[in-house]
Amino acid sequence: MDSALIPEGAKRCSFPKFTIGIAIVGAVVLWGVYAMFLCWFKGLNQTNMNDYYGFALWIWADLAVIAVGGGAFFTGLLRYIFNVDELKNIINFAVIIGFICYSSALLILAIDIGQPLRGWFIFWHANVHSMLTEVAFCLSCYFAVLTIEFIPNILENRQANKVPFFHHLAHNMHGVMAVFAATGAFLSFFHQGSLGGVAGVMFGRPFAVREGLLIWPWTFFLFTWSAAAFGPSFTLLVTRITEAVTGKKLVKDNVIHLLAKISGWMITTYIIAKIIDTIYWTYVTIPSLGFKISHFYTNNSFYGYWILITEIIVCGLVPGLLLINKSTRENPNTRLLAIVLGVIGVCLNRWVMVLQIMAVPVMSFDTWALYIPSWQEMATSILPIAYGVILISLAYRYLPVFPQELELNQPKADQ
Amino acid sequence: MKVDRRSFLGLGLGAVAGVAVSPVGMKLTDDSSIWTQNWPWTPVPVDGEVTYDSSVCSLCPGNCGISVRKIDGRPVKIEGLDGYPINNGGACLHGIAGLQYLYDPTRVKTPLRKNGDKFEKISWKEAISLVSGKLAEIRKSGSPEKLACITDKTQGSVSQLFNHFLTAFGSSNYFDMPSLESFLELTAQTLHGKGKTLGFDLENSDFVLSFGAGLIEGWGSPVNCFKANASRKERHAKLFQIEPRLSNTAANADKWIPINPGTEADLALGICAVMLKKNLFKAGKFKGSFNKFVAMVQKEYSVTKVAETTGIKANEIEKIATLFAKAKMPVAIPGKGRGNGGQSLKEFAAIHTLNCLAGSLNKKGGAFVMAMNEYLSFPKAIMDEVAEKGAGKTKIANSVNELVEKLNGSSKPIVDALFVYNANPCYSLHDPKRVKQAFQKIPFVVSFSSFLDETAMEADVILPSNTFLERIEDMPSQAGLARNVIGLTRPVMDPVFDTRNPGDALISLAHGLEGTIAESFEWESYEECLESVTADVWDSLSEEGYVLVSQGPPKGNPIVDFTYLSANPSTIQAQGDLELMLIPIDNMRLTGTAPMASPFAIKTVSDKVLTGTDIVVEINPMTAKGLKDKGYATLTTPVGSAKVKINFNEGIMPGVLGMVKGLGHTCDNKFVSNKGVNVNDLIGPVIESGSGLDAAFGIRAKISKA
Amino acid sequence: MIHDKKAHKFGMVIDLDKCTGCGSCMVSCMSENNVPFKEDESRKKDSITWMRVYKLTNGKSFPDTEVVYMPRPCQHCGGKGDHGHSPCVSVCPATATEYGHDTGIVSQIYTRCFGCRYCMGACPYHARYFNWWDPEWPEGMENYLSPNVSPRMRGVVEKCSFCYHRYQAAKDKAYYEERETIEENEYQTACATACPAGAITFGDLNNPSHKVHQIVKPDPHPDPMNKDVVGKSRNPKIFRLLERLGTNPKVYYLSEREWVRKAGDNYLDGEWDKVKNHHGSSSHE
């Protein structure tokens, strides 16, 4: 029924089947939208946040989604600036994932602030000393960049491409994409870092605070690094899921292995830096403030050393090594394990750097605070995932996202 | 004109681009932020001229002077009044929250009449005629003594006006609720003679031996005590606090001496014994079986016996006795918690005897035996024959508790009508359900309450009173204050609702009854009455807002009569035989008597006392076998049982459970009511023979996982 | 408008031995500053109390248990080196909170705050409160609201302002009376005036004639043991909460009891005994 929109030569499932799929995910989206309106009209008492947990599930979701969306900028940087040509076969998809991640982040922020109608004050009354200001500006600019990077792919839709203006526009945009990729990488470096800076500059919170270089705490660099490291893993994970759902191979193995190898090395070097940072923080920073590391991992019912070990070893060092090592990298099962662990690891890191900070008591007579999100928070956090599924479905169905798709899916020769 | 797709797109894009560069976007975003400042449901308080009014707070017997800041005549803040001889600028949280009482929408806004089990609004005219009609019937029946009255105190013109009314009516059945003042008066009467009360010069004493008195938790005149306590450091004065739990007073004291609940009298007599034995006492005008007392106390309250009873080591008791006796200006303070509720005469007398033996009577820093206030000059009530007959009959009971007992015990009504003013016996007496039962036997109950509290709910008619911020009244100091001050509560604004001064209501009632009763109430208004009955002091009272009648030690050395104690009255035991002891706790941030705590006060209550609607009970971890900290439990006493939450607290003796007073209200105020449990529901009265007082200090209890 | 010629540093010292835990400071603050109240205020993590009284214990078991009450207003931190980079001020993305270099007071603009709550995360004292609900007053109770302090709307952060409106009123009065300076007793916070035990002393830490300066004797030099710390009290019985973090708060606490002073900060095993008598640099003012 919609075959006129489908890329030439590509096979897609039937339109009714597609519609049903979209409708099911759409219901989840509607649930999330309902929760969103509840929060906007009734206020943030719809959440389980409180004065100890000013930053909670949404901020974690924000940070996590931006971290995993780092595949977009990093892949773009590698493709356009470092001319890793093979990555052209996955860059479109990485951009779409990035677009979804960043639009979700902006949406969550619009719900999370207490006075959404005043949200623009962050631009108008900007405080240059605040990390969040940096985040807001760069996030918005980068989202614009991602949109610009996404547009050519949209314009390459079979019908849109017929319009000469769109055809030429797309072609020309491809030509100057390097500029946008560079801009995107530059912006990403700063906002990924600033999100880390959000935690690292809080010198009132020993769990978060880090020393650093000039005005940038070490968490700044660790966040950028981890986003560049785990973002590609997320891209690979979503590709793998898409391949499973569509039943097609969409990207050649050599591209996958290349991106996995790059991700693996980035992860491993990141983890080494993270371990050094953690050791320094444990033995130099916090003792100078009167704390032992056990203060942050004991005497409460949730945050134990398990979370540190899981983040750094199980979901950090292990995936890194699995992806560096050729045999485990090229084995689809161990590679899948590695990228899943990796994505969990970066999400865990973002959880720790938002929620564990809030939970830890600082005054000696203060107590641990624990928190469970409300259904409204969960619905609005699942909303981006559902919306992402829909957007990827639409993009995959109607746009030539994967250049190697047709080549990999030639009709089989008759037996 | 044909609009094809291209031109449509072009037009559309052009329009969008045009709007984007126009000021529309900026204007709308700016407007939206202004909307967020002006939502109609965010109040904008109106500004105006600032003025300050002085008055006296009467929420508790402390009677602190207050300063009320007003904007265009609208009170917005209450603070303590600098220079006022009781509190000198300080105020407690309840007084500061006074405006929440004034403007409380759940107040009784107009007179009410009970119809079935609902109240309906009536006018003052109707209400007065209804009440005076019923009262006239009682007089007609020839038993005017069946009109009874319960108020909070006996002093002050309003209380005396109620008494005056009853006398002219023909009844002597005027009762005041048990209060620190009533206990101090009784103690003074027992030891020193009629017409006396006690004051304690805390701000000058160098050694305060407090037997559970909540000196910084609302005992006496709270702010006066706070200040006396705060100056301890500079004056190098010591405070020893004797009580079963680490109250705030104990925590602030120089030494906390844990004691088995209910054994304070024994300890006091034990200390007396030590002082007498070691000749550490100062001789005074000791009359009435002093020698008998000495013999009794050394026999029955030897250090070993007392150590056993109280749980305090013998050498510790001797040390306390020595320190107390050798201090320059020692004073011993009776009255557990706020000093109201269940207290025993033996305990008060025994503790005060320490002051007598230490030579602290009428000395700086000691205990003052003060003459009761005599500044009021009421005209004699004009009584007709009916009145003479009725007033001549003996009082039907000697206390509110005894009244309740008699009401419950008799099959025919002994009270036909009851006035209740500024008291909430259906909440603040032990085992309130028996009080409610008793009140239900009274055919006509008239409440003068401003709030629909538990007692007002039992009334047939409510004649609502102005709150203290809306009325004029004399406030004589009491409750252990070492100086005698008469304050003047003044209205800071006209009544918010259709309420009246209780004095005005009484005058209207009297006029409604005509005859000699009306003749006894010649005044047109309460204000006129006040001015006339305080004639001796009115000029300075109305000009300054207070009269400092006396301060400093009273002259003369009072006699001390040991008759009562020498007979060794028995120490009250807690009711029941369960393994643990439940004691009530007086928490500064709550009130155990009328009125209830305000929303601000409830807001300050710790989550270790109240979580949601669950009251939290203190228990030492050692006692809490099988119980979980912050978990639920069922607390059972011989009187009742309740679901509670548990708080493990090292600051309470093992074997003892602590529950705060002041929660568990059942009135219609969502901020304050239906939270927690009324501890009085779990404790029953234990009448002390001789004094007739309900001396229950607690009750035996058990607790198990819910 | 009066322009103060000399920079003030308004602060307070709270004598924890005098504090009774009565809660008058809490109620006076709420009454003065139009703080709302809800039906259930027992969930202290979303109960707005600009001034909050904490209850500390020495952790010992019966009968050696000791308890102290600690009133905690906003600490009006000066930040590391006391240069005005309070933990909260540095992180607010909309400059809705600012450090006043002329008063030392950290202000809050309710109408600019858009409720991101970053400042709340940054504050280790939990002195900042969020309006999770729209404040509502029972019918008639809005009459007692003061026109000197704006009632807030939901979705914004609020906190103790050291009763800044009283400072403005004092300045106005001085201006009308053609005076340049305001007297110590003309600007006092609601909590300080309310405290019936006189435990709170408020004033200008920079003014040698003010009581708070005389009691605290703040050392204007950086602490040799921690150069981010300025204004440490020369009295070893006076401490500040979490002083080691370098927040440089303006609220000082006094206690004769060692365990109370130790509870004011965090120490490694054995560290307390080395530093407990340290009181500022050796130079004299």
Image: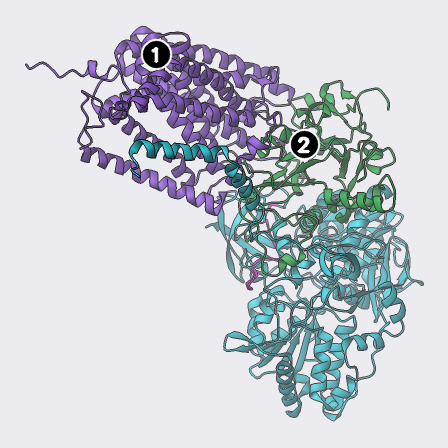
Chain colours: A purple, B cyan, C green
- Considering every residue shown, the one lying at the far right of the view is B556
Is A152 in front, or is A47? A152
- The quadrant holding residue B340 is bottom right
Residue B267 located left or right of residue B355: left
Crowdedness near tag 1: few (<14), some (14–19) or many (≥20) residues, C-alpha within 10 Å? many
- Residue sitting nearer the eye, C131 or C245: C131
Residue C176 colored in magenta in the image: no
Please name the amino acid that badge 2 sits on: Ala
Q: Which residues are magenta?
A: B654-669
> Which residue in the structure is indicated by mark 2?
C263
Helix, strand or loop at disc 1?
Answer: helix
Mark 1 lies on residue: A259
Task: Kindly identify which numbered label has been placed on residue A21.
Answer: none
Under mark 1, the amino acid is Leu
- Magenta: main secondary structure: loop
Chain of the residue under label 2: C
Q: Is residue A222 above or below residue B301?
A: above
Q: Which is nearer the eye, B146 or B42?
A: B42
On the image, the x and y values in percent for residue B421 come to 68, 72
Q: Position of residue C272 (x, y in %)?
A: 70, 24
Q: Secondary structure at mark 2?
A: helix
Q: Residue furthest left?
A: A415
Measured as percent of width and height from the top left, residue B490 is found at 78, 66
What residue sits 48% from the left and 48% below the top? Answer: B632
Classify mark 2: residues with Cα within 10 Å, few (<14), some (14-19) or many (20+).
Answer: some
Residue occupying image coordinates x 55% and y 68%? B433
Tell me whether marks 2 and 1 sit on the same chain.
Answer: no
Asked which quadrant contains residue C11, the reply is top right
Residue B338 relative to residue A147: left or right? right
